[in-house]
């Protein structure tokens, strides 16, 4: 502990901080201690695990691309405009962040389902998304898009408007300013938003099983495979796949730290 920390950090904070770490880290250590390390290779290479892994990665990548393609324009607009309608739109985007997964699934079902508000129209054209990988992507975009927008919006708001106006004064158009001034300065937040969206998509469970179901090779992602293993009295497989998911999250966290460190200016 350095001199500044000793002078400004109250000692009583250590107790609630330690309790918080215990509540978060304890379950993870328990999972690691109980993991079937001896048979882990067979579990991770089983057809069920590999199929779920491939589906999870494929749908998470697709939904993340959609989140970036749709969320970045939305975040840019929200960062530039003000007014009651913009505030209402911001509030609307926050709802999926706090919505119960089951409620999210029901909302998706009544909108995208075969008898849903928009899904019925898609069915008429033979483009229904129910119980397919497309349904998983729809769910993931619904729950992940707000994470991307919030991260990107926070970074975009920190861009100095004077720099943008200086570029405009020199004759640069809005698109040129966006490409060469705004986005480079906001890129750390955009990068974090992409990784957050990918992580959220990878771990989505409740809305997926409610709307898309659990069909092997079609909608059964890693979280759904874990739930099926538990219900099928296969706790060792559930533990093994849980470790796989944790490993993927550690990779995402490492990439997030490395990416932001590379993008942020060094002083």
Image: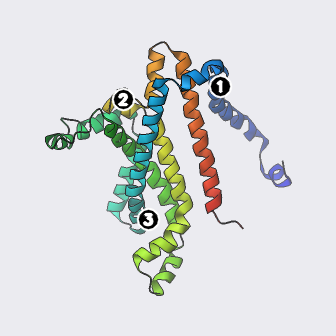
Q: Position of residue 5 (x, y in %)?
A: 80, 51
Residue of label 1:
32
Q: Is residue 173 left or right of residue 235?
A: left
- The residue shown at (42%, 49%) is 146
Mark 3 and mark 1: Cα distance apart in space: 42 Å
178 left or right of 89 in image: right
Element carrying mark 1:
helix
Asked if residue 7 is positioned above or below residue 115 in the image, the reply reads below
- Of residues 204 and 244, the one nearer the viewer is 244
Dividing the picture into quadrants, the one containing residue 35 is top right
Image location of residue 43, percent across then percent down: 55, 22
Q: Quadrant of the C terminus?
A: bottom right
The first of marks 3 and 1 along the sequence is 1
Relative vertical location of residue 246 with respect to residue 65 in this rendering, above or below: above
Q: Earlier in the sequence, mark 2 or mark 1?
A: 1
> Looking at the image, is 69 positioned above or below residue 182?
above
Q: Identify residue for label 2.
A: 209
Report crowding for label 2: few under 14, some 14 to 19, many 20 or more residues within 10 A (C-alpha).
many
Instruction: Give percent across and percent down for residue 245.
Output: 54, 33
Task: Tell me if mark 1 has few (under 14), some (14-19) or many (20+) residues whose alpha carbon lies within 10 angstroms of its own.
Answer: some
Judge depth for marks 3 and 1 and give the one in front. Answer: 1
Nearest the viewer among 19 and 174 is 174
* Spatial separation of the CA atoms under disc 2 and disc 1: 26 Å
Q: Secondary structure at mark 3?
A: helix
- The residue under label 3 is 79
Residue furthest out toward the right: 3
- Is residue 204 at least partly visible in the picture? no
- Residue 59 in percent (x, y) is at 41, 41
Element at label 2: helix
Q: At x 36% / y 40%, what residue is drawn?
A: 139
Furthest residue in direction top, as rendered? 233
């Amino acid at each position: 502990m350095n001199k500044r920390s000793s002078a400004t950090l109250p000692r009583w904070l250590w107790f609630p901080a330690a309790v918080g770490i215990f509540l978060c880290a304890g379950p993870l250590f328990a999972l690691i201690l109980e993991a079937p390390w001896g048979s882990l290779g067979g579990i991770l290479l089983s057809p069920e695990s590999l199929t779920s892994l491939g589906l999870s990665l494929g749908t998470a990548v697709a939904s993340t691309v959609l989140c970036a393609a749709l969320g970045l324009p939305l975040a840019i607009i929200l960062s530039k405009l003000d007014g009651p309608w913009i505030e209402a739109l911001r509030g609307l985007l926050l709802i999926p962040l706090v919505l119960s997964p089951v409620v999210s699934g029901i909302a998706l079902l009544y909108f995208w389902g075969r008898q849903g508000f928009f899904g019925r129209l898609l069915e008429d054209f033979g483009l229904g998304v129910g119980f397919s990988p497309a349904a998983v992507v729809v769910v993931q975009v619904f729950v992940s898009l707000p994470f991307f927008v919030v991260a990107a919006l926070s970074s975009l708001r920190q861009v100095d408007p004077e720099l943008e106006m200086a570029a405009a004064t020199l004759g640069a158009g809005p698109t040129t300013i966006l490409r060469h001034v705004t986005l480079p300065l906001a890129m750390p937040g955009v990068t974090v938003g992409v990784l957050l969206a990918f992580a959220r998509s990878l771990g989505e469970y409740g809305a997926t099983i409610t709307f898309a179901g659990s069909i092997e090779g079609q909608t059964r992602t890693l979280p759904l495979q874990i739930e099926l293993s538990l219900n099928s009295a296969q706790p060792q497989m559930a533990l093994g796949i849980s470790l796989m998911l944790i490993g993927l999250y550690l990779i995402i966290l490492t990439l997030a730290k490395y990416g932001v460190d590379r993008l942020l200016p060094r002083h």
